[in-house]
């Protein structure tokens, strides 16, 4: 199908299991993509949880998603981001690559490697993809 799972969360709410799946694919996620993943995932979740009432939501990451784990950097290679550093500065660019302890961006035509422990937060920013 070409989808990557960005995040799965679940929580019980008044006897119902609420599951939220965030998916991504390189050429974008549309309503049909969410419906396809919903059908596929719901049938599997129902097998796992039997008769339990399940509420499933499937969505795209959104254009300004805050990256929540270091694993997400590799999912979004080639995408624009704004990185907010712990020293108060920020840097925009495209994710070139991501490893276990760092991410490399292309910013203003040069490669910059940042260690994850230097980063306060990172948000997707499609304005960094222009030009």
Image (cartoon, grey):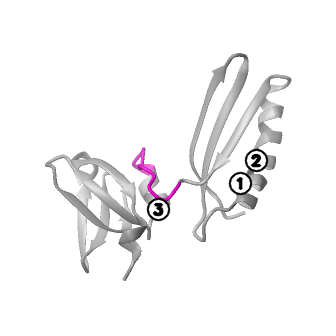
Q: Give the structural element (helix, strand or loop) at label 2.
A: helix
**Earlier-in-chain disc, 2 versus 3:** 2
Q: Is residue 68 shown in magenta?
A: yes
Q: Main structural element of the magenta stretch: helix, strand or loop?
A: loop
Q: Is residue 9 above or below residue 110?
A: above
Residue 34, numbered label: 1
Q: Is residue 67 above or below residue 2?
A: above
Q: Give the structural element (helix, strand or loop) at label 1.
A: helix
Which quadrant of the structure image shows residue 47? Answer: top right
Residue for badge 2: 38
Q: Quadrant of the N terminus?
A: bottom right
Q: Give the structural element (helix, strand or loop) at label 3.
A: loop
Question: Alpha-carbon neighbours of circle 3 within 10 Å: few (<14), some, or many (≥20)?
Answer: many
- Left or right of 86? Residue 61 is right
The segment highlighted magenta reads 62-71
Residue 62, numbered label: none
Residue for badge 3: 76
Question: Alpha-carbon neighbours of circle 1 within 10 Å: few (<14), some, or many (≥20)?
Answer: some
Q: Residue at (69%, 16%) from the top-left corner? A: 14
């Amino acid at each position: 199908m070409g989808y990557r799972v960005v995040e799965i969360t679940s929580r019980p709410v008044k006897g119902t299991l609420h599951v939220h799946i965030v998916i991504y694919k390189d050429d974008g996620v549309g309503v049909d993509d969410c419906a396809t993943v919903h059908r596929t995932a719901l049938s599997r979740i129902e097998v796992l949880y039997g008769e339990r009432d399940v509420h499933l939501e499937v969505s795209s990451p959104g254009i300004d998603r805050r990256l929540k784990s270091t694993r997400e950097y590799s999912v979004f290679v080639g995408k624009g981001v704004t990185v907010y550093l712990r020293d108060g500065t920020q840097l925009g660019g495209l994710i070139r690559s991501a490893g276990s302890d760092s991410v490399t961006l292309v910013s203003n035509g040069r490669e910059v490697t940042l260690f994850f422990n230097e980063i306060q937060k990172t948000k997707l920013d499609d304005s960094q993809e222009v030009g």
